[in-house]
Amino acid sequence: MTLWLVRAGRHGEGESLALEHNLVLAGWEDAPALNQFSTRDELKAKLAEVYADEGTGTVTNWTGQLWTFAHRIQPGDLVALPLKSRAVVAIGRVEGAYEYRPDFDSRFKHVRPVKWLKEIARTEFDQDLLYSLGAFMTVCQIQRNQAEIRVKALLSGQPQPTSPQNDLSGADDAAQVDLQEYGRDQITAYISQKFKGHAMARLLEGVLRAQGYTVYRSPEGADGGIDLLAGQGALGFAAPRLGVQVKSGDGQADVKVVRELQGVLKDFGADQGLFLSWGGFNKAAYTEARKRFFNIRLWDSKDFVDALLSVYDQLDPELQAELPLKRIWTLVSEKQDG
């Protein structure tokens, strides 16, 4: 059994299709059916013809990824799909052979059937695994540092084998790593370690203040279901008036806590609710939140880091000192997928 990274579009545009239809997808919409080629060289020659404007290196790279998708991945192998829309990695098991489906979606004609087993919060992965899962490639094998064994442990809820946390040299299948994503994962891990419990509510308070809210933070202990109250204006009397609940643990919150937040908003005179669950939410919670779109927002660690980075320069200097960040520039990698 092998573990593979298979993305669903550069910006995650195929995530919903993949999860709803139990598939892993490859782009390259102009590439013909891959199962008509008996050798990698035949496929490469065709791709060079179809993508005549691309360089030799790019065509070689794409050939390797598409050949892997159609031939190297085997039924029974595990696949990891890091979601762009939420801070989770979907793990599935390949159920069948490659299929060419021009009738399915014009962007994603190359598919493999898969059974999705579990969505695991990114915060549950060690940093070196996140580094491998941050490869720019659409399709590649993940094998460094006993990756397959450790992902299987996460699936079963068992302790992971100890990993060499400082071994981040090289990426699987010689893939380049998305340094922006890797940097965000480092920030997320640091916040998870340094801002446990009530400190997470204090950090969110700082973000809301930077966004222009006047904020009241409940003291530690029983809070009646609300950690923060936030309103616009100098005294916080103006709308929108938010009731905020914060859950700093790695576990997914369920629909019950969303309904509980909904129930206490009126008690505090709040118009809308914000629920930050660091480990994310289960499917039922997201379904409930969609029904209450104009009343409640759910944030996972990704949403929170997005909000934090957008106002970091306006944070209180004491918070900046506790969470020291620096903006850097880096060269955008050569195109890795189609």
Image (spheres, grey):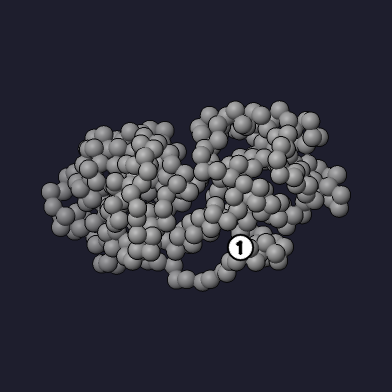
From this view, report whether residue 14 is shown above or below residue 283: below
Question: In which quadrant of the rendered image does the C terminus lie?
Answer: bottom left
For the point 84% across and 50% down, the residue is 233
Q: Position of residue 258 (x, y in %)?
A: 62, 32
Q: Quadrant of residue 239?
A: top right
Local secondary structure at mark 1 = loop
Residues 235 and 223: in front is 223
Q: Position of residue 225 (x, y in %)?
A: 70, 34
Residues 152 and 65: in front is 152
Badge count: 1
Relative to residue 192, is residue 131 drawn left or right? left
For the point 33% across and 66% down, the residue is 169
Question: In which quadrant of the rendered image does the N terminus lie?
Answer: top left
Q: Name the residue at the left extreme.
A: 38
Residue 271 appearing in the image: yes
Q: Which residue is mark 1?
A: 323
Q: Position of residue 20 (x, y in %)?
A: 42, 33
Residues 15 and 153: in front is 153
Label 1: how many Cα within 10 Å (few below 14, some 14–19, many 20+): some
For the point 70% across and 40% down, the residue is 221
Q: Position of residue 76 (x, y in %)?
A: 24, 37
Residue 29 appearing in the image: no
Q: Amino acid at mark 1?
A: Leu
